[in-house]
Image: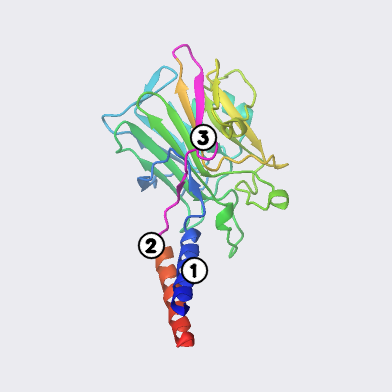
Amino acid sequence: MKLMRRNFGLFVLFFGLLQVGAASFLPPIWTSDVGAPITSWSSGNFNSGLATVNFSSDFSFSLFGQSYNSVTVSSDGSLYFGGAPGNPQPQAIVTQLLQGLPRIAAAWYDINAIDGVSSIMANTSLPGEVVFTWQDVASYTPAAGQSVAASDLATFQVTLESDGDVILGYEALNSLDPAETGEANSLLGSQQAILGITDGYGATDPGSTDLSKMAASSGFSDLTSSDTIYQVIDNNAPDNSDLAGIDLIFAPQADGGWLVTSEDGAANGVSPTPEPTTQAELALASLVLLGWWYKRSRVIR
């Protein structure tokens, strides 16, 4: 009986430690092969920088009737087509969204990197698609010696498909009010964030669409006639927007506009894929487990 209790306790402890590495959930559509970090930033680093990424010779991306073989990546969460803005535009402003270049904003806000933690990556070697990933990025620069809680970081991804589809995937991004929800706020320090797609060049403003709220309901789809569709997430007064675990799929329509659908593990009955436990977490779990087991064995004997 003592042996059974000891082994049961061992199992519970090990299972609990594994959950440390599986605390966040990936959306149903997520590319784990994120490629290599982008290093050619105009600012010398990816805090408020721009970088040109060339596609492979067998891939081009069609957007608003134009075919592109490269894209300008902004560290602040956007992809620009047909050129680069005069500056990185860290603050998300609707008028700049509409007046600028054609753009895909996965999450446009004042993104900052944390040394040794954050990465912005591109994979241009996948068949039929190109993937960009913002991994563990913060929305403000901490003071010297100050850290940012892992729960306050954001991770999201843009996939460009060869047929013109665009997929925005979110592992962690929200403007939740910690005082009310007890959850983290990925946008701390930012006034607002904007996500969506625009044809730019003075596009007519269709108004903000609450994509995050609609995507959280089962069977969501939205057919737009406008080539510009976006959501403003206001963080001055947190609006409890939460995109974690959600995909937004934008399919271009022949007559213009987009068919927007979503894949949300919770809403659509799909079990989201847990973030894999890292080798470091497994090693730590094993060490703690062995120490506990050794001490427990000596007490029982």
Q: Which of 75/210 is in front? A: 210
Q: Which residue range is magenta in the image?
A: 254-279
**Crowdedness near tag 2: few (<14), some (14–19) or many (≥20) residues, C-alpha within 10 Å:** few
Q: Which residue is mark 1?
A: 13
Rendered image: mark on residue 279? 2
For the residue carrying disc 3, how many other residues have a C-alpha within 10 Å: few (<14), some (14-19), or many (20+)? Answer: some
Instruction: Check disc 3 and report its element: helix, strand or loop.
Output: loop
Residue 127 is inside the magenta segment:
no
- Say what amino acid the circle numbered 3 marks: Asn
Task: Give the residue type that dot 2 points to.
Answer: Gln
* Callout in the foreground (3, 2): 3
Give me the C-alpha separation between circle 1 and circle 2.
17 Å
* Helix, strand or loop under label 2: helix
Q: Mark 1 vs mark 3: which is more N-terminal?
A: 1
Extreme residue toward the left, this view:
57
Rounded to the nearest whole Å, what is the CA distance between mark 1 and mark 3? Answer: 32 Å
Colouring of the image: rainbow
Task: Return the x and y of residue 53 as percentages of the image width and height.
Answer: 37, 37
Report the side of 44 relative to 152 (left or right). Answer: left
Is 257 magenta? The answer is yes
Residue type of the residue flagged with mark 1? Leu
The alpha-carbon separation of the residues under discs 3 and 2 comes to 31 Å
Q: Position of residue 136 (x, y in %)?
A: 50, 51
Q: Are marks 3 and 2 in contact (CB under 8 Å)?
A: no
Q: Quadrant of residue 131?
A: top left
For residue 268, the mark is 3
Question: Which of the marked residues, 3 or 2, is nearer the chain's N terminus?
Answer: 3
